[in-house]
Amino acid sequence: MAENRTTSMSGGRFALVLALSLVAMAGLVVGCGDMAGTATVNQRPIVEFTNVPADQDTFSYAPVVTWKGRDADGFVEHYSYADIIDSTALLDPQYYINFIPEEAWIQTAATSDTVYLLTESGAITQHVFYLKCTDDRDAESVITYRTFYRTNLPPRVPEVKWMFYSDSAYHENSIVPDTLYSLDEPNETWPGLGFNWRSSDPDDRELYRIPLEYRYYLERVPHDTVWEWTARNWTTKQDLVFAGLPTGHYVFSVWARDDGYEVSARPATATFDVYQPSFEQSILLFNCTTENPNARAGFGNIIPGTQIGDLYKMLASDYPDVEYHHYTTSEGMILHKAFLGRFRLVIWFSENAAKTEALFQGKVRDYVRVGGKLWVIGELARQNIISDSTMSLMGSTFAGATGGVTISRTFDAEFTGAVSGVDGLPDLVIDTSKTSSSFREYWNGAFRTFPCLPGIDIMSAGSGAESAYYFKSYTDTASGDVSNDLATVKANIDTIYYPPTPVDCLIKLGRSRVLEVTRVENTTRGITGQVVTLTNNVGSTNQTVVKVSYPYGEPWATTDTVRVDYRFQPYSDNSLRPVGVRYERLVSDEGSTYIVRYRVAVFTFPLYYMDNSQGAVTQMFKSMLNWFFLPYAH
């Protein structure tokens, strides 16, 4: 019976469910035009601050505020925040929520932003920072907020400097003392006219530096703004390179602005002068030969009346617009960049050994780098005219001079001419009528003299440089084998005291760089000695000393006649080393041809003392001018 009751009850429940289902279906059939049913209610998203700054914090900079949002039944579409300084909001932030202007909201997809909290200089400003988010169904979260305080001081006045100066040269008002050359475009040898600037903010902290922005403008005085070099908007860049500036006087000004949009009290300024080289004249002859009324003619010194300038003016006479200047001392010497930039070629020469201070090496170097041409000529060119840094223009350096300027050092006076290293340049020899400087050499029992010049610099040719001339020494024609030369028996040679003994003695030769002695004969005694030792460069006069042994007997006497056969190195160390180098700076035009940026030549020997009786100096000079003014790569 229990089973029957259970079955009966189950059947009743089934009938009830079936009846309800039929009713529901009937309702659906009747209302088949409205099948939407009841929709699920969208849940609002939630947003919250996730980091410091905390509520009521005070800042002297623009803080980075971060947040996060979430949506239980979707996702957050974007965030919005508003920085409010309205007095009503400050009194009651919660009440003001309903009055936040729509345009005050800043929309972002990010979960952080730098909030500038703008304020007035020197003031403490209260801000209410409101935050909300919006989900994918356009539902907005409850608005949350924090109160912040902002203090702000304007950035310091910027400092500016010329780009090649060190950091110690930064100043609020910088003045570039020298004129600056200007070309239309920077190139491999002219980097442009550049300035760097910087500033800082009093609100900086050890772990935080206020980000600064700058605006700048260039003004050609008086009051002519160069708009091409003016920043229309604020920028974080801190350097600028100008090009194409016409000749004139300029003021470059730079303002600074901090993250609160406070601007520096005044701008930094850089004042400078610009000259765009015209190269309108052909040649400047710049004579810095020192005049010495007490000098002896022929010893590398120029006395009043010597026609050095006339020689160069004659050599350059094919050009009608040559300009000549002679400065006997550094005082009063005028060599402005604007003056140099008028000439296509500057020939700077010093025809004596007296030193002229090289006050203008930097000006000459800058002149060359903007396309000028330079020819340096004269004795001791390194000391008189240019330096190794100037020589770097042509990939060359000075390897040292043959001697100093002191004429008593006659063993340094061995330059007799220049041997050509380039087709079209003739060999040059000194004019013996213009110099009494000479080298005295003991040869076969007598002294002979060689007219020479002292103090000619030796150079080394760098990569791409062309050795135009080589040092010609009086030794170039000497023979290395000597027979029956005279030698002297010595008891004392400088610091060596070695009197003759019955078995050996010292003899001195009138020659240096001796390689081998093959015969030593005392003709007074009819005895042939044997060489024990051979020593070159003994004492202050670089003597050659030979120790000789002989059979036991009377010591050789200083009055004995001694004949010697020997072999020596006839060429000096200076022989055939460069004394004239020329160089052209070439750059590729990205094709098969090359552009000449500049040409430089340095001759370390004077032209006045070279023999021009057959026109050799004139031929050399004209050939060099043709090379300088050649319009294409050589």
Image (cartoon, helix red, strand yellow):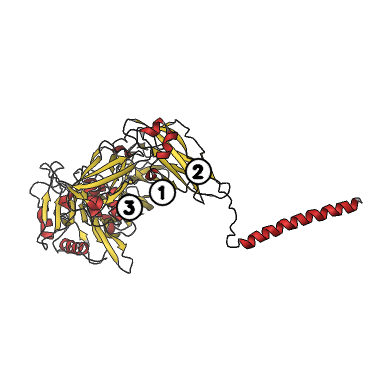
* CA distance separating discs 3 and 2: 93 Å
Element on which disc 1 rests: strand
Q: Please name the residue that numbered disc 3 is placed on.
A: 573
| Cβ–Cβ under 8 Å for marks 3 and 1 | no
In the figure, is residue 82 to the left or right of 288?
right
| Cβ–Cβ under 8 Å for marks 3 and 2 | no
Quarter residue 277 falls in: bottom left
| Residue 122 in picture, x, y percent from top left | 32, 30
Q: Please name the residue that numbered disc 2 is placed on.
A: 141
In the figure, is residue 507 to the left or right of 609?
right
Please tell me which of labels 2 and 1 falls first in the chain: 2
Q: Give the camera-side residue of 253 and 499.
A: 253
Tag 2: residue type? Ser
Q: Give the camera-side residue of 286 and 502.
A: 286
Q: Please name the residue that numbered disc 1 is placed on.
A: 531
Is residue 203 visible to us here? Answer: no
